[in-house]
Image: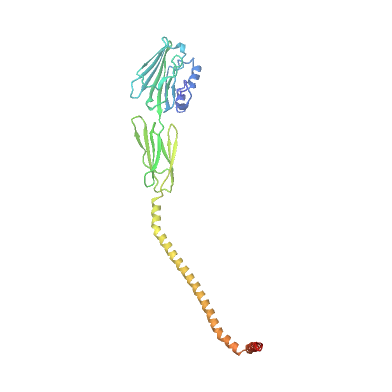
Amino acid sequence: MLCPWRTANLGLLLILAVFLVAASNSLCTDEKQITQNHSKVLAEVNISWPVQMARNAVLCCPPIEFRNLVVITWEIILRGQPSCTKSYRKETNETKETNCTDERITWVSTPDQNSDLQIYPVAITHDGYYRCLMATPDGNFHRGYHLQVLVTPEVTLFESRNRTAVCKAVAGKPAAQISWIPVGDCAPTEQEYWGNGTVTVKSTCHWEGHNVSTVTCHVSHLTGNKSLYIELLPVPGAKKSAKLYMPYVILTIIILTIVGFIWLLKISGCRKYNLNKTESTSVVEEDEMQPYASYTEKNNPLYDTTNKVKASQALQSEVGTDLHTL
């Protein structure tokens, strides 16, 4: 539940305006207990109050004792709509509404129990002026609220072309602020205003001559900050350089492949030549040794003696066979 802090210090209320977006409704009760004797000081107060869309807001009347009240009236002035009034008369215990069609704007409770006004949920159409008037025998008192509905923008980031990034804060209220990390060559920020009071902010930056691979878009807004990052495409000059040297790289690979193939063929040929040469040498040596061996056998006395012994043994064997036969 949301409600501004009741205090006579208007400057403090303005400083705490953003903080009070998330404040508690219990502040109204606390202030009513501590300001019973200061109603004349609070005869006229106007507060600027930002409230985030879709939240619950509670607007408080001046802290006047109920026994002193005669009439309580809420006057609601919304943009593009007729003025709405909600009133309560204590003497007759009656409530009355005029031109009030929005069911999201109601009394917090019955007016005789709680005179505060509740808006739930807060919509962008609730942007306007709200005033509580309290009539008493001592005079009339009122408290007014310039209610500003805050709308969180939708943030998008994309790369268009040639290392150019586009960041958008769409339909925010009020307008968001966009900054870049790192800073690039940025065009003037564009703003597009919509009929419902929201604003779309667009920022375009370029990093063609920068050695940057990732950029961040930072969006600042009263409802909260948000950052998105994107990786840029490589520098176009780097691409062209790579393409320029690519044919030379391919040609070098082809030449190295051919040289390597020739080297392998050369090694294989040398191995085959050496093997054939070794085999030929062995055959020639054997052929050259055979005549020498025959000559040696023929002219060697030992070789003759061996042959004679073999012939004598063969003759004896034949004679023995013939004798046995007889």
Displayed quadrant of residue 120: top left
Q: Is residue 102 above or below residue 177?
A: above
User: Which residue is pictured at 55% across the width and 81% down the height?
Assistant: 286
Say which residue appears at 50% left-offset and 76% top-offset. 276
Q: Quadrant of the C terminus?
A: bottom right
Q: Residue 179 is drawn in which quadrant?
A: top left
Front position in the image: 216 or 44: 216
Residue 174 picture location, percent across and down: 39, 31
Q: How is the image coloured?
A: rainbow
In depth, the one of 249 and 3 nearer the eye is: 249
From this view, report whether residue 15 is shown above or below residue 186.
Answer: above
Query: Which residue is situated farthest in the top direction here?
Result: 91
Residue 242, position in %: x, y?
A: 40, 55
Q: Residue at x 51, y 78 (%)?
A: 280
Report the front residue among 301 and 74: 301
Query: Residue at the front extreme?
Result: 326
Residue 93 coordinates in the image, percent (x, y): 42, 11
**Front position in the image: 250 or 282:** 282
Q: How many marks?
A: 0
| For residue 290, side relative to residue 100 (left or right) | right
x and y, in percent, of residue 162 in the image: 37, 47
